[in-house]
Image (cartoon, rainbow, N blue to C red):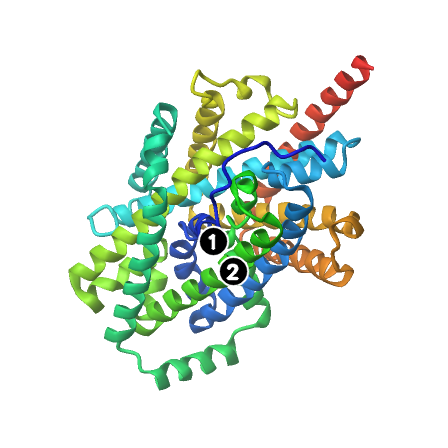
């Protein structure tokens, strides 16, 4: 293993949990509420908890590989270093990870837009929503091209502020909600009698994208103190905290906002009913928290994913022009490419497609990481049983989403499959070029 570069190790457990929570609590929770309410009603909190448990299974491999390799490249580096003689493995995980980030960037931007226009006359205008989403991607791309220092200074403030506001909103919704505890339990039992376990598991799988971001802790391995202890503590602790936050928000929404309102305004579910429950000020608070959460997530995604794209290109697994950096070490071409591809995904798909594409992508990526960890489980000191359980759970999650698409949205499933075929072809092509290059050097 290569030695870790000497840096100031000034990130403790509290800071690392903030990084992971900031990465997870983005647009996901604001996006999944309406869709989940439409599919399983008052069982939404249960699906959120199951989704969190799937995330815990995925995190197991990240924790073990993160402690073993201590490589800030995380997902891509884990596979590249475990299978050094298999370029196709490194190329595939690189392409899948990057396009996973593109889908989450599209999701966060789409959610930002939905809430930004939710109280206007254009709330249900799809093209206005997409135009605002394109604009916010452009703004954060320009900020990152110009200077990352300014956004970096306020990132921590944004993370903690959005958590406080989300907690306040949830308490206000519960306090002013028209549904009593007994009525909630009645609705819960009623939905449990009619809902199929399959539907609950499908929603749980779709919510997986709302937990994407915990691996950002590993990207900071060179700046953290005591990585052997802090990587697992930060990742598991952050996931438990985020499960709690999501469940509280979901309960607040279900207690306060009529189910039909949540379903009707699924793109901006919380704001759609908040004004009737806690007034215009409450609605403004919901919208502000959504904009703050998505802004923070967009900023972090644009920053981190563009740099990872540049590293993959430098290794020869993506077009070389993506590796170009300016005098400030900013990957200009990668940033612009990320923005253009995310904007294209917004153009061709709505919220459900983007959400499901993102969930499938990160389930597949996490599955590949789990398999990687299983292969070297003796070196990472991993439990064979937990590793196999992780592989099974992540595989089932991906299959469930594809099954739902096949039975309900065949055109969307075909679109997703075509995207993955193209990604695999691209990865295979560059892996072949890389292998040929290595052979020529020998």
Q: Is residue 389 above or below residue 113?
A: below
> 217 and 407: which one is in front?
217
Which numbered tag is attached to residue 237? 2
Name the outermost residue toward the top.
440
Relative to 317, is 247 above or below? below
Determine the image quadrant of residue 168. bottom left
User: Which residue sits furthest left?
Assistant: 280
Who's the residue at 55% across and 29% down the image? Answer: 309
Instruction: Left or right? Give the position of 401 relative to 61.
Output: left
Q: Residues within 10 Å of mark 2 (few under 14, many from 20)?
A: some
Q: Quadrant of residue 98?
A: top right
Crowdedness of circle 1 by 10 Å Cα count: few (<14), some, many (20+)?
A: many
Measuring from the top left, give residue 51's x and y in whole percent.
Answer: 54, 62
Residue 17 numbered tag? 1
- Name the quadrant of the C terminus: top right
Q: Quadrant of the N terminus?
A: top right
């Amino acid at each position: 293993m290569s030695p870790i570069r000497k840096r100031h190790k000034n990130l403790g457990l509290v800071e690392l949990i903030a990084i992971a929570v900031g990465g997870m609590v983005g647009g996901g929770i604001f996006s999944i509420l309406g869709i989940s309410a439409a599919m399983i009603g008052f069982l939404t909190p249960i699906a959120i908890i199951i989704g969190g448990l799937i995330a815990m299974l995925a995190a197991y491999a990240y924790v073990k590989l993160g402690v073993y390799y201590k490589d800030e490249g995380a997902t891509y580096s884990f596979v590249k270093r475990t299978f050094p003689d298999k370029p196709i493995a490194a190329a595939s995980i690189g392409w899948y990870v990057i396009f996973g980030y593109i889908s989450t960037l599209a999701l966060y931007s789409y959610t930002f837009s939905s809430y930004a226009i939710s109280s206007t006359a254009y709330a249900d205008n799809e093209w206005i929503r997409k135009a605002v989403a394109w604009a916010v991607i452009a703004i954060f791309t320009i900020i990152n091209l110009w200077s990352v220092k300014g956004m970096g200074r306020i990132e921590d403030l944004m993370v903690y502020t959005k958590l406080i506001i989300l907690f306040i909103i949830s308490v206000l919704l519960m306090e002013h909600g028209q549904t009593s505890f007994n009525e909630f339990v009645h609705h819960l039992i009623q939905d449990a009698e009619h809902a199929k376990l399959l539907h609950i598991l499908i929603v749980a799988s779709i919510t997986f994208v709302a937990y994407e971001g915990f691996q950002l802790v590993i990207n900071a391995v060179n700046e953290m103190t005591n990585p052997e202890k802090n990587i697992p503590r930060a990742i598991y602790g952050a996931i438990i905290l985020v499960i709690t936050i999501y469940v509280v928000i979901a309960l607040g929404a279900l207690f306060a906002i009529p189910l039909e309102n949540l379903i009707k305004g699924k793109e901006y579910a919380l704001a759609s009913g908040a004004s009737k429950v806690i007034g215009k000020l409450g609605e403004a608070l919901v919208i502000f928290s959504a904009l703050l959460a998505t802004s923070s997530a967009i900023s972090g995604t644009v920053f981190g994913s563009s740099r990872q794209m540049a590293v993959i290109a430098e290794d020869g697994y993506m077009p070389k022009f993506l590796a170009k950096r300016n005098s400030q070490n900013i990957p200009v071409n990668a940033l612009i490419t990320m923005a253009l591809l995310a904007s294209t995904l917004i153009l061709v798909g709505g919220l459900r497609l983007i959400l499901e594409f993102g969930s499938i992508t990160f389930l597949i990526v996490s599955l590949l990481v789990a398999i990687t960890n299983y292969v070297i489980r003796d070196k990472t000191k991993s439990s064979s049983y937990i590793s196999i359980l992780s592989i099974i759970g992540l595989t089932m999650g991906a299959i469930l989403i594809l099954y739902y698409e096949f039975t309900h949205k065949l055109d969307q499933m075909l679109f997703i499959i075509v995207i993955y075929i193209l990604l695999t072809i691209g990865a295979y092509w560059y892996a072949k070029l890389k292998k040929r290059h290595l052979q020529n050097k020998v």
